[in-house]
Amino acid sequence: MKQSLLHPSLVLCLALLGTSCSIININIDFLDDPNLESAVLDQDGDLFAHIVPIELNDEIRNYIDSNIRSNLAPAAKIGKVRELMFDSQYLNIQYSTDQTFTAVEVFERRSGNCLSVINFYIGVIRYLGLDASFQTVKLALYGIAEVA
């Protein structure tokens, strides 16, 4: 029998983080804007290569170091990260429909949309020496479209 590669605590934490994304109202009736489209498609380089969405600053690293013991088991670290992120005694990060933020901006604002919160989460989990990455998920939106 093949063993799962994801620890049950990690799956639970990802599920909790993902629930905030499920309440987003996705409007698929976008209006085409040829000028905006050409500005994006005609770029010959990344205009924001200097931005690393999951990068942590010293303030965040110090916060993590002072609240999570390095000798904890991986599952305990994952649980503690979730607690630090969402518990009212710690960061108390709140879901927001604002623009997508970097990990540092989430820490400073104590809020973010689902991608913003994942930026913070992945940055912290990797800092703790655990494996975390973004995944592409294919799903049906309202039963009428698929996103990959």
Image (cartoon, grey):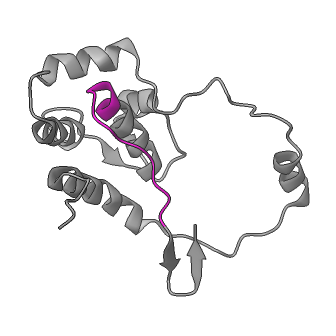
Residue furthest out toward the bottom: 143
Using the rendered view, name the quadrant where residue 110 is placed.
Answer: top left
Which residue is pictured at 26% across the width and 53% down the height? Answer: 5
Q: Position of residue 38 (x, y in %)?
A: 89, 52
For the N terminus, the quadrant is bottom left
Residue furthest out toward the front: 1
Residue 143, relative to residue 60: is it above or below? below
> What is the magenta segment's predominant secondary structure?
loop
Q: Position of residue 100 (x, y in %)?
A: 52, 44
Magenta residues span 124-137
Using the rendered view, name the quadrant where residue 124 is placed.
Answer: top left
Residue 131, relative to residue 21: is it above or below? above
Q: Position of residue 31 (x, y in %)?
A: 78, 69
Q: Nearer the viewer, residue 4 or 29?
A: 4
For the C terminus, the quadrant is bottom right
Which residue is pictured at 21% across the width and 43% down the height? Answer: 86
Q: Nearer the viewer, residue 65 or 32?
A: 65
Q: Exactly how many numbered labels are in the figure?
A: 0
Q: Nearer the viewer, residue 63 or 90?
A: 63
Which residue is pictured at 23% across the width and 22% down the height? Answer: 64
Which residue is pictured at 12% across the width and 34% down the height? Answer: 89
Magenta stretch holds residue 27: no
Judge left or right: residue 2 versus residue 125.
left
Residue 47, relative to residue 114: is it above or below? above
Judge left or right: residue 66 versus residue 23.
left
Judge left or right: residue 130 versus residue 26.
left
